[in-house]
Amino acid sequence: MFYVNARAFIEREGKQGTELVIQTRNKPGEEALELPGGRIELFESVHKALIREVQEETGLTITRIEGASKRIDTIGINPDFEVECVEPFCVYQTLKGPIDSIGMYFICKAEGKLFEQGDETKGATWKTLQSLRTMIDQNPLQFSNVDRAGLKYYLKHRVVRD
């Protein structure tokens, strides 16, 4: 089985700089800290999947996806075949492990109140970038296998105030 995912770096500016939403996976045998996101359904738009997954897991409504204005689609050209092209912040691919997957990370803004418990998630909260750096340096295995790499990439390449 091969999975395709859409995942979110949901940013906001807090009193101590940029913060991201982090949550705990609430599925037996898969408990780990993770970013919101999940599997894209068959023929589902990447952005629609991202919006749906974030809402199901966190209760937040995405108000902005960085790079969304660059999206191109072929809807209306051929009713039997439609394609969209989007620009994610970064992409991951598993190279080894029990699940073969590829996924796109998007930088987002969102509004609303965080769920205490979402779809197979719990404990969604805002964490400062400094806190996340410390957490990943001290115990990288507390993060999901996929998001460990995604967070390291974000913390290395994203230029934000913090």
Image (tube, grey):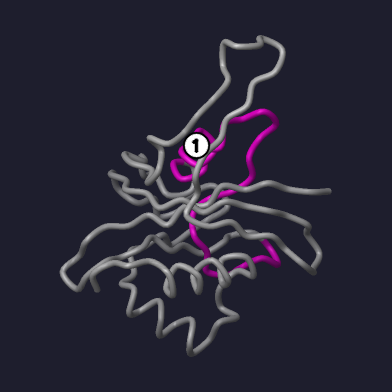
Magenta stretch: includes residue 139 = no
Q: What residue sits right under mark 1 in the picture? A: 47
Residue closer to the observer: 19 or 29: 19
In this view, 97 is above or below 12: below
Q: Residue furthest bottom?
A: 138
Looking at the image, the residue that sits furthest to the left is: 15
| Part of the protein shown in magenta | 28-55
Q: Magenta stretch: residue 37 in it?
A: yes
Percent of width and height locating residue 63: 31, 39
Residue depicted at x 81% and y 64%: 98
Rendered residue at 66%/9% (across/down): 79
How packed mark 1 is, by other alpha carbons closer than 10 Å (few <14, some 14-19, many 20 or more), is: many
Q: From the image, which quarter does the C terminus lie in? A: bottom left
The residue sitting at 40% across, 76% down in the picture is: 132
Vertical side of 161 occupied by 49: above or below = above
Q: Amino acid at mark 1?
A: His
Q: Residue at x 52, y 43 (%)?
A: 53
Q: How many marks?
A: 1
Give the side of residue 59 with respect to residue 145, left or right. Answer: left
Say which quarter of the image contains residue 156: bottom left
Residue 64, quarter of picture = top left
Residue 57 place in picture, x, y as percent: 48, 48
Quarter where residue 61 is shown: top left
Q: Secondary structure at mark 1?
A: helix
In the displayed structure, 12 sits above or below 44; it is below
State left or right for residue 3 relative to residue 158. Answer: right
Residue 153 or residue 14, whichever sits in front? 153
Q: Of residues 55 and 137, which is closer to you in this image?
A: 137
Q: Is residue 109 above or below residue 96?
A: above
Percent position of residue 39, x then y:
64, 45
